[in-house]
Image (spheres, rainbow, N blue to C red):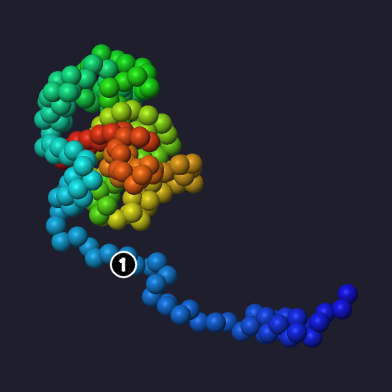
Amino acid sequence: MSVSPSKENILKKIRKALTQSTPLPFPQSEGNSSVYQPSRQELEVEFAEQFTKLTGKFIFCLTWQELAAQLNAVVAHNNWQHIYNQETELSKTLAGNGFAPAAFDSVANCDAAITSCESLIARTGSIVMSAAGPSGRSVSVYAPVHICIARTNQLVYDVKDGIQLVKEKYGASFPSLVTFATGPSRTADIEKTLVVGVHGPKEVYVFLVDQ
């Protein structure tokens, strides 16, 4: 099959280009360093500011006893009867400090669901969860209210730091899904009107204990 002179000329130019390396036009933009400046305030404060901007509800607690008391108060105030929590270790810790609602085994019909997390991202106010975590993929999505219990040693500044924590924790068994939940579910697909709680929880709480 013959090749037209014009096509052969193009192919020659391509072959020549492939034999000559082209320097990167912007060598400093290859992701080796963050484009965001480090936070000038404590990570707890940074996370609280960013998370509450997204209409998240943030409660800082000095001890697990204080956390359990605050959680009891929130549940009573909202008159929640059905609290879903299938994380054994977290349930034991909460119960040992005074929070022990009756067990409820349906995430689809609960008033609120409690989970732990992999980490918290201060810069974006995001909760990092994974499929390998105790609550799996669905709890934080299907429950109408998501209550996340986290520790201050899980706070990191940026997304890459959160991913690094997951890598260090799971090694070669990296989770099949890592989720960054940034505030309550929201969409403006219908007539550009913002609606909260369509594709996930309508309210998100973060209880952060100093540990």
Q: Position of residue 90 (x, y in %)?
A: 28, 27
Q: Position of residue 128 (x, y in %)?
A: 33, 43
Q: Is residue 158 in sight in this rendering? A: yes
Quarter containing the N terminus: bottom right
When asked about the image quadrant of residue 81, the answer is top left
Toward the front, the furthest residue is 191
Left or right of residue 176, residue 109 in this image: left
Q: Amino acid at mark 1?
A: Val
At x 35% / y 35%, what residue is drawn? 198
Q: Which residue is mark 1?
A: 35
When asked about the image quadrant of residue 88, the answer is top left
Badge 1 marks a residue whose secondary structure is loop
Q: Is residue 187 above or below residue 141?
A: below
At x 31% / y 23%, what residue is drawn? 85
Q: Residues within 10 Å of mark 1 (few under 14, many from 20)?
A: few
Q: Position of residue 126 (x, y in %)?
A: 29, 46
Quarter containing the C terminus: top left
Left or right of residue 73, residue 196 in this image: right
Q: Is residue 39 above or below residue 196?
A: below
At x 46% / y 80%, what residue is drawn? 25
